Amino acid sequence: MEESNSNAYQVASIGKRTIAYFIDDIVVSLFLFIIFYEQLLSIYTQMQGSMDFMPMVHFLEQNSIVFILLRIIYQTFFVWQNGMTVGKMAVKIKVIEMNTGETPSFQIAFLRASLRIVSDSIFYLGYIFAYFNPLVQTLHDKLAKTIVVDV
């Protein structure tokens, strides 16, 4: 972000970002529940009374790529379209490109969403960066050259 633009934005707090994260996780989980409703119902029926979790384990193994892709698509689409996912809309924060102050391009939104999966997958270590960065950037923000600001 250019020096002249840096004062024009209020960096979003870690608290707002955390709330947005959980709201987005709920939204994506609802999408997954709708998509896999029949399979989940069948697994629930199989597990009733037996406490055999293997059908659920197999389901998770078989569909992990779908889960990851849905999260990437969700994050990419909403951040690319208006800089805000449903969670970010709820807490009134937005992702912008640092260099331009604009809503991220498709490529930047996709890069950020893909790197976000890495941040999530490695014990959420990518999020710890936000605590040590004056711009509250996570690893995926830093690498995608984005920042999350209050609307």
Image (cartoon, rainbow, N blue to C red):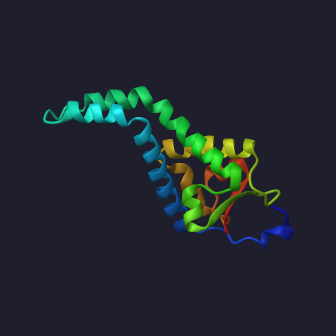
Residue at x 59%, y 56% (from the top left corner): 129
Residue toward you, 98 or 47: 47
Q: In which quarter of the image is the N terminus?
A: bottom right
Residue at x 55%, y 62% (from the top left corner): 17
Asked whether residue 20 appears in the rendered view, the answer is yes
In the rendered image, residue 12, in percent from the top left (x then y), is placed at 62, 67
Residue at x 44%, y 30% (from the top left corner): 63
The number of numbered discs placed on residues in the rendered structure image is: 0
In the rendered image, residue 120, in percent from the top left (x then y), is placed at 51, 46
Quadrant hosting residue 46: top left
Q: In this view, does 39 lie above or below 140?
A: above
Q: In the figure, is residue 103 to the left or right of 27? A: right
Q: Quadrant of the C terminus?
A: bottom right
Residue at x 32%, y 31% (from the top left corner): 57
Asked whether residue 118 appears in the rendered view, the answer is no
Q: In this view, does 23 lie above or below 29?
A: below
In the rendered image, residue 50, in percent from the top left (x then y), is placed at 14, 32
